[in-house]
Image (tube, rainbow, N blue to C red):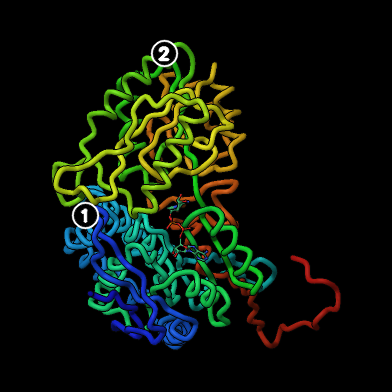
Amino acid sequence: MRTITHWIGGKPENGTSGGTAPVWNPATGVQQAEVALADAADVDTAVRSAAAAFDEWSRSSLSARTKVLFAFREIVNARIGELAEVVSDEHGKVVADARGEVQRGLEVVEFACGIPSLLKGDFSDQVSAGVDVHSFREPLGVCVGITPFNFPVMVPMWMHPVAIACGNTFVLKPSERDPSASLLVAQMWADAGLPDGVFTVVQGDRTAVDALLDHDDVAAVSFVGSTPIARYIHERATATGKRVQALGGAKNHAVVLPDAPLDFAAEHLVAAAFGSAGERCMAISAAVAVGGPGDELVAAVAEKARAVKVGPGRDATSEMGPVVTAAARDRIVGLIGTGEAQGATLTVDGRGLTVPGHEDGFFVGPTVIDGVTTDMDVYREEIFGPVLSVVRASDVDEAIALINANPYGNGTAIFTSSGEAARRFQRGVRVGMIGVNVPIPVPMAYYSFGGWKDSLFGQSHIHGPEGVTFYTRAKVVTTRWPQVAAAGAAGFHFPTAT
Ligand code: NAD
C-alpha cells in the first residue's frame, strides 16, 4: 500500500507516529493509498522547521520573493493537467472541473506575484514641523492552513501564496481524504527555488490540528471547512493569542424571480447545484422559486437534472463524479429519505444510482426536492451533495427575509431582469458574496472571499487585500531629523501637530 507522507524541511518525511488513514478512489470504491497521520511530535518537528526558516525568508528582498512566485506560477501552469488528475482520483470530481480549481488557485498566485505593490506602505511628509510619518507591514511568522477535502488545490492556494509572498513561512494541514495534491504542490514550490522549510505539509486529522492550534511557534491560523469545526478552531486558537480566520459551511440560496429568463435560470441552477456533485462551498443548495412560474421552473430544472451524465471523474464525457466517501454518500442518501419522510416531494431521486463498471463507486445522482419548508432537515442541514431543495416565496422581499433567517451567509444569487429588484436584493441580504444572474459568485483573486454569520469566524476574508492584511501587521514610524543648531527643548505636553 502506497503511503502519502508529510513534507518537512524541503523533502518527504514519514513522521514517527505510525498512524495512518485510508485514502479511497471514490469512482471505484477501492482504497488506493494510506496517508500518514501526524501526532504532536510530528507537528512539533514540522513547526520547528518552519520557524527556523522564517528569519531568513522574512528578510528576503521583495524581488527575490517575486522571482520564486513567478517560477512557481510557471511550474503549476505547466503541470496543471497532472495536478487535476491527482485531485480527480482522490476527490472524485471530473478532471475538467479539477483543472478549473487549479486555474482559480493560480489566479491567487498571480495576485501574489504583485506583492511589491501590495506591500507598499504610506508616507506623509511634514505632518508637523520637520516631522514625517510612514507605515509598513511585516510578516507574522509561522502561519498555518487547515483545509477541507472539496478543493484540495484551490483552497490551500487561497492561503499559501499570499502568506509566503508576505514573508511568512507556511504549514499546510490538508484534508486526510485527498492529501496527495499538497505533496505535488510542495515539490513545485521546491522546484521554483523556495528555501527548505518555507512551505511544509503535515498530514493528519484532529490530533494534528489540535497540536498546531496549541503550538507556541504558530502565529496565525487560516481554516476553511465546516461550521462546527470553524467555530472550534476560532475559539481554541484565539485562546492562545493567535490570529485566526475560520471560514465555515454554507446554505446558498438562488432566488428566481418571475421576470427571469426561465431556461437560462434552470440551466445555471442545475450546473451550480450538481457541479462537483454539490461538494462546493458556493454550490446552490436551495432554489427559491418566486411567484407563479415556480412549477414551470421546477419542471425545467428536473428535466435538466435527469440529463446530467454521472460517471467517473477520469471519463471525459462525465459531467458529475461520485461523492468523496461511502460515509458521505450514506449521509446524503439518508437526508434525501428524511426529506421525503418529512413531507417534501422527490421530483428527481438520485438514490440507488449505479454507474456500469463502477458499481462500488460512491455515486449519488442529481436530486431535486420540491415543496421544502424551512423546518425540514434537508433545508436546515448543509447536505454537501448533489441535492437541490426548492422552497417557494411570494416576492423578492419574502425571499430576502428567508435568506436572512438562515444561520449561514456565504453566497447567494438572484435571477431577474429587474435592476431594481437586483439592487434591493444585494442591499438587503446579510450574505458575503452575491451573484446577479451569476449562480456561483466566487470573487476574483484580487477581491477577498468570505461569508457572513456562521460562514465566517474572525474578521478577515481570505486572499485579495484582506489576505495581505491578515498575513502581516503594521508599523507606523514618526521621524524627525532635527538640525542640531535649531533643536528646541522637548515639551511635556501631549504631542499635537503644529
Ligand atoms: P471539515 O470541517 O470536516 O474538515 C476541514 C478540516 O478540518 C480538515 O483538514 C479536517 O482534517 C479538519 N477537522 C475535521 N474534524 C476536525 C476536528 N474534530 N477537530 C479538528 N480538526 C478537524 O470539512 P470537510 O468535510 O473537509 O469540507 C466540507 C466543508 O467545508 C463544508 O461544510 C463546506 O461548506 C466547507 N467549505 C467552506 C468553504 C468556505 O469558503 N466557506 C470553502 C470550502 C469548503
Residue topped by disc 2: 293
Name which residue lies at 43% across and 69% down.
Answer: 163
Task: Please report whichever mark, 1 or 2, sits nearer to the chain's N-terminal start.
Answer: 1
Is 239 in front, or is 190? 239
* Image-based side of 476 in relation to 143, left or right: right
Quarter occupied by residue 1: bottom left
Percent of width and height locating residue 394: 54, 16
For disc 2, does the CB lie below 8 Å from ligand 1?
Answer: no
| Residue type indicated by callout 1 | Thr
Residue 453 image offset from top left, x and y in percent: 60, 46
Residue 493 in the image, given as x and y percentages of width and height: 85, 74
Q: Residues within 10 Å of mark 1 (few under 14, many from 20)?
A: many
For residue 28, which numbered disc appears in the image?
Answer: 1
Q: Residues within 10 Å of mark 2 (few under 14, many from 20)?
A: some
- Of the 4 image quadrants, the one containing the C terminus is bottom right
The residue most toward the right is 493
Q: Nearer the viewer, residue 353 or 192?
A: 353
Q: CA distance from mark 1 to mark 2?
A: 41 Å
Q: Secondary structure at mark 1?
A: loop
Measuring 41% from the left and 37% from the top, which residue is drawn there?
A: 284
Q: Is residue 433 visible?
A: no
Residue farthest to the top, as pictured = 292
